[in-house]
Amino acid sequence: MQNTKETLVTAFALFSLFFGAGNLIFPPLLGFQSGNMWWLVALGFCLSAVLIPLFGILAHAKIQGTIFDFGKKVSRTFSLMYSILIYAISVSLPSPRTASVTHEIAVQPFFDSPYIVTSIIYFSLVFIFVMNRSKLLNILGKVLTPAIILILLAIIGITVFYFDFNFGTTHFDNPFTYGILEGYQTFDAIGAVVVGGVIIVSVNISNKEKTFEEKRVLIRKAGWLAGIALFVIYAGLIFTGAVMHNQFDADITRTALLNSISIKTLGSTANLFLSILVSLACFTTAVGIVTGTSDFIRHLFNDSQIAYIITAVLGCVLGVVMGQFNVAYIVNVALPALMFIYPITIVLILLNILPEKYASTLVFRSVVIVTAIFSIPDFLSTIGYDNEVIFLEELIPLSKYNMGWVIPGFLSFAIVNVLGSKKPIHE
């Protein structure tokens, strides 16, 4: 009974880690546009937004380290640069996006005020909480996540039992790969690498009497439970959007669609409650990102409190600057960065869960370098150079799906292992 309780508590902690409120805006619109191919989009989305992040947790359980340890086999310099880049992206994109989501879900429907006002107030409060490290956020997190889950399950359940299963035609040429790429926008794989170690530390502290293997089994069971729950929520929201494809205007925004679906299924009162809960959950996410980044920089500067404060200020200023834009704009701006950093993050996660004999230093270096190189065309195509790299679509398999790195990365992994170069190279 005790083991079951520990597994459920850990599963809930993992679910809360990945279930960012901002993520809720992506599945409904995916379903809304995917039509009768909603199930294929859901599989792609859950592959990158559920399975890969859970692999990240399993990798943390294996290496028992921090984000720095994920790339250490490539080189310490690479690992440092990768860590800095990940934190820079986190405070520049997903953190400000929480302010935009809050404005569009909880402010815009009721008040005619500009984004910048919400952004300034929002990140002023974020800064106060970052500097004071209030335990209130942990308490809020334990209450918010179950409340949001119950409302979402109610939305999904009402849709299943009270709406006709009438699906339109898909808007996507390649539903599966589109779902994968949209899953990048959740930033969950990055979240697993950045803060997954916090969960591992917590498990170690609360289960000191357990052996390493027992703790790994606990994390594995909890991970799959959390994954199943995430899959149900994400797939359910995609299904809900698909069923309601003819209920709203075709050009409806992500946040407006989530609001409209909740009103149609639960009524305006429940929608107001959901708006408040999502906004609070967004706020806790932003505080977590800025605090984590500030802690990382402080560690680099010998635990300097000045470095912590400066980073917190810069993180909140960046939040105000980017948070004044709408969600759609931030999503578009995030795409180029994600097209480059996400493939590298995915291969680092996968390599770290493999047995040592298949993941030598040489394997790490070759796979990461090849993945980075073959991600460049995808990156360039998202910043306006698609005509310049279009010829590569004929040369690189899967390149036209913005996944040109997959086969070259796998081939480099296979070739290095087949050649038997498994001896670690000293840095």
Image (cartoon, rainbow, N blue to C red):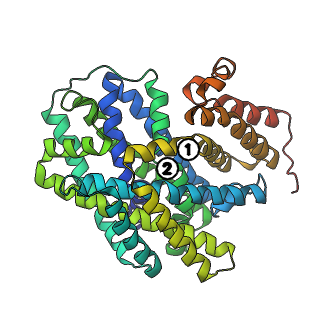
| Residue at horizontal 27 percent and vertical 35 percent from the top | 241
The 10 Å Cα crowd at callout 1, few under 14, some 14 to 19, many 20 or more, is: many
Q: Nearer the viewer, residue 367 or 86?
A: 86
According to the picture, the residue beneath numbered tag 1 turns out to be 338
Image quarter (top left, top right, bottom left or bottom right) of the C terminus: bottom right
Against 341, residue 112 (above or below) is: below
Q: Nearer the viewer, residue 61 or 230?
A: 230
Against 295, residue 402 (above or below) is: above
**In the picture provided, is 3 more to the left or to the right than 352?**
left
Asked if residue 272 can be seen in this view, the reply is yes
Please tell me in which quadrant of the rendered image residue 25 appears: top left
First in residue order: circle 1 vs circle 2? 2
Q: Which mark is residue 187?
A: 2
Please tell me in which quadrant of the rendered image residue 88 appears: bottom right
**In the picture provided, is 202 more to the left or to the right than 375?**
left
Q: Amino acid at mark 1?
A: Leu
Figure disc tally: 2
Q: Residue 416 in the image: x percent, y percent?
A: 81, 36
Q: Residue 377 in the image: x percent, y percent?
A: 65, 32
| Residue at horizontal 30 percent and vertical 60 percent from the top | 279
Asked if residue 1 can be seen in this view, the reply is no
How far apart are labels 1 and 2 at the CA level? 8 Å
Q: Is label 1 in contact with label 2 (beta carbons under 8 Å)?
A: yes
Q: Nearer the viewer, residue 186 or 145?
A: 186
Q: Amino acid at mark 2?
A: Phe
| Residue at horizontal 32 percent and vertical 42 percent from the top | 254
Q: Residue 262 in the image: x percent, y percent?
A: 19, 46
Element carrying mark 2: loop
Element carrying mark 1: helix
